[in-house]
Image (cartoon, rainbow, N blue to C red):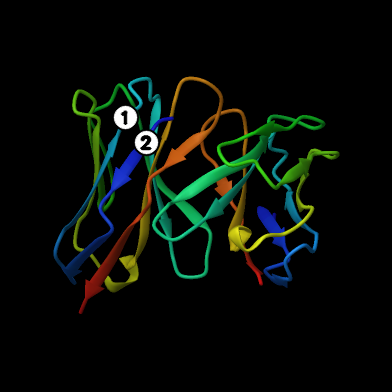
Amino acid sequence: NAGVTQTPKFRVLKTGQSMTLLCAQDMNHEYMYWYRQDPGMGLRLIHYSVGEGTTAKGEVPDGYNVSRLKKQNFLLGLESAAPSQTSVYFCASSPTNNEQFFGPGTRLTVL
Amino acid sequence: GEDVEQSLFLSVREGDSSVINCTYTDSSSTYLYWYKQEPGAGLQLLTYIFSNMDMKQDQRLTVLLNKKDKHLSLRIADTQTGDSAIYFCAEKGNAGNMLTFGGGTRLMVKP
C-alpha cells in the first residue's frame, strides 16, 4: 500500500514550457486535490475532484488544468509555465469523510 | 474567503511544553485539524477535533477549541527535538470537503 505518490519529485522548466504532474493513490479514495505551497502562505487549493471524471476549481486555479480519467490518478497540467508557478505542489486524497492523505510533494522551478 | 491565521515561529527547549495557536474566521467550521510537515516531506495528519468538542487529548498532544473566539491550540507535552517541524492548522467548513490552511508555525526545539 503506497498511499499517495507524486511524479516527478523535482522539475525545472523554462517560461512557456508545459508539463504534467501525476498523482496516484491506491486507497480507492473518491476525493483528490492539488495544492501549492508557498513560503508563509500555507497550502492553497488549485483544483480538486470529487470522483472519477469530475473536476472543480479551487482557490487559485488560473494557469492550471486537471483531469481525473481514472479514479486512482489526478493529473495537474501547466500549459505555459510562468515564474509565478514556482512552488511546491502537493497532491492529497480522501475518502468521503474527513482525513486528507498527502503525497511527498513536487518541487517545481520555472526560470 | 475564509481565513486561518498562525504565528510564524515558536522556539522551546527540549522537555518543555509547546503551545501553537491558530485563529479562524469560518463560523460554520465542522472539523479543525493539525498537520505536521517535516523538511522535504508532505503533510502528516496529527490530530483533529470536531467543532462541538472543547478538548481532545492524544498521548502528548492536547487540542483545545474555543468556538466562541474561533481559537484553536495544539499543546505538545515534553517536547522533543524530533518535534521540530512546521505545524499547520486547517479548518473544514460545512460545504464540500475542502480545507483552508493557515500559513504554518515553525517549531524549533533546542536541546
Residue A14 place in picture, x, y as percent? 74, 70
Label 1 is found on which chain of the structure?
Answer: B
Question: Residue at the spot x=82%, y=31% of the render?
Answer: A53
Q: Name which quarter of the figure residue B79 lies in.
A: bottom left
Question: Residue at the spot x=35%, y=26% of the render?
Answer: B26
Label 2 is found on which chain of the structure?
Answer: B
Q: Nearer the viewer, residue B42 or B3?
A: B3
Residue B50 place in picture, x, y as percent? 36, 28
Quadrant of image for the N terminus of chain A: bottom right
Badges 2 and 1: C-beta atoms under 8 Å apart?
yes
Q: Which residue is mark 1?
A: B25
Q: Label 2: how many residues lie within 10 Å, few (<14), some (14-19) or many (20+)? A: few
Q: Is residue B106 above or below residue B48?
A: below
Mark 1 residue element: loop
Question: Residue at the spot x=34%, y=70% of the render?
Answer: B82
Type of residue at label 1? Thr
Quadrant of image for the C terminus of chain A: bottom right
In this picture, residue A34 sits left or right of residue B55: right
Residue A80's tag is: none
Question: Residue at the spot x=25%, y=53% of the render?
Answer: B7
The Cα atoms of the two marked residues, 2 and 1, are separated by: 6 Å
N-terminal-most mark, 2 or 1? 2
Q: Label 1: how many residues lie within 10 Å, few (<14), some (14-19) or many (20+)? A: some
Q: Which residue is mark 2?
A: B3
Type of residue at label 2? Asp
